[in-house]
Amino acid sequence: MPGVRINFSKTGIGGSVGFKGFRLTKRADGRVQRTLSIPGTGISYVDSHAAGGSFSHEEPAASTTPAPHKTAACPTCGHRYTIGKVNFCAQCGAQLVSETPQAQA
Ligand SMILES: [Zn+2]
């Protein structure tokens, strides 16, 4: 599918889809980032929202927003992870149980 990009990272699987002037990015933390730009002008607009929520401006200082997804603790090190988003602990690398696997390993 042209224009679709999947990102694999330590913290999970994200992806983005976009075309000229518009991009929708699914971030590894479960939030969706929307980027609008006007080609040739340098003008762009970015906002994001938690999956399933409503769009809102991203607050640079906000860091206490509760995670919108169901989380569990790594059985090995206790690191919190989002069920269905990551297959391996970002902290210790242990394999994690996923209730909703998205892809075959
Ligand atoms: Zn761990």
Image: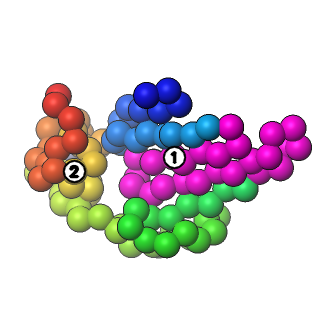
Circle 1 sits in a helix, a strand or a loop, which is it? strand
Query: The disc labelled 1 sits on which kind of residue?
Result: Thr
Residue 84: mark:
2
Residue carrying label 1 = 25
Q: Nearer the viewer, residue 26 or 64?
A: 26
Query: The disc labelled 2 sits on which kind of residue?
Result: Gly
Q: Which residue is depicted at the point 38% across and 67% down?
A: 52
Q: Position of residue 35 (x, y in %)?
A: 64, 50
Is residue 101 visible in the rendered image? The answer is: yes
In the displayed structure image, the side of residue 53 where residue 78 appears, left or right: left
**In this rendering, the label closer to the viewer, 2 or 1:** 1
Circle 2 sits in a helix, a strand or a loop, which is it? loop
In the displayed structure image, the side of residue 59 where residue 24 appears, left or right: left
Q: Which residue is depicted at the point 22% across and 51% down?
A: 84
Identify the image quadrant of residue 80: bottom left
Q: Tell me, yes or no, whether the highlighted magenta stretch contains residue 39.
A: yes
Q: Which residue is depicted at the point 48% across and 55% down?
A: 32
Please name the predominant secondary structure of the magenta segment in the image. Answer: strand
Start-end of magenta stretch? 20-44
Identify the image quadrant of residue 19: top right
